[in-house]
Image: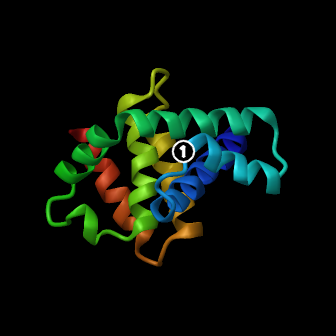
Amino acid sequence: MSSTRRLSRELALQVLFQQEFAPKQGVEAGLETFRRSFDAPADVWDYALQLLKGFEVNHVAIDAVIQECSAHWKLKRMALVDLIIMRVAAYELKFASDPVPAPVVINEAIEISKKYGTVDSAAFVNGILDQIVKH
């Protein structure tokens, strides 16, 4: 399950990153673009879509939670990859109808940030997500 969910989270990251540059494309269309290029089990696509739709519905509240828990950083100043990783994780932590345990969400976000972010991403993401859990 962990590897399935990890792939879903990575897909959500990629779709949301793509949407920053093509904002008129919906999450389903964005995910479909990746579906044409990558082969993955149905449950990977299903969970990725759940994450994307969850963020889409709750994006204002998710960004507000991240902003509130990142004392000295404005969202606009954050690295886009880090921000998107935290958005997906914040959805899972605070808004998902079937919440994932916080240690799992934070660990997954850290591992994904090590893969896609900078040298400092993992510590940055960990610090803010820890604050979100305590909030």
Taking the image as shown, residue 127 lies to the left or right of residue 109, namely left
Taking the image as shown, residue 30 lies to the left or right of residue 105, namely right
Image location of residue 62, percent across then percent down: 31, 42
Badge 1 density bin: few <14, some 14–19, many ≥20, Cα 10 Å:
some
Q: Secondary structure at mark 1?
A: loop
Query: Is residue 6 among what the camera can see?
Result: no
Residue at 27% in and 67% down: 76
- Residue, far top: 97
Residue at 35% in and 35% down: 58
**Residue 47: which quarter of the image?**
top right
Front residue of 32/43: it is: 32
Residue at 31% in and 68% down: 78
Front residue of 89/31: it is: 31
- Residue, far right: 39
Residue type at mark 1 is: Gly
Residue at 21% in and 57% down: 70
**Residue 37: which quarter of the image?**
bottom right
Residue occupied by mark 1 = 26
Q: On the rendered image, what quadrant is the N terminus found in? A: top right
Total marks placed: 1
Image location of residue 56, percent across then percent down: 43, 39
> Considering only vertical position in the picture, is 94 above or below 27?
above
Taking the image as shown, residue 3 lies to the left or right of residue 105, namely right
Taking the image as shown, residue 135 lies to the left or right of residue 116, namely left
Query: Is residue 135 among what the camera can see?
Result: yes
Image location of residue 23, percent across then percent down: 46, 55
- Residue, far front: 24
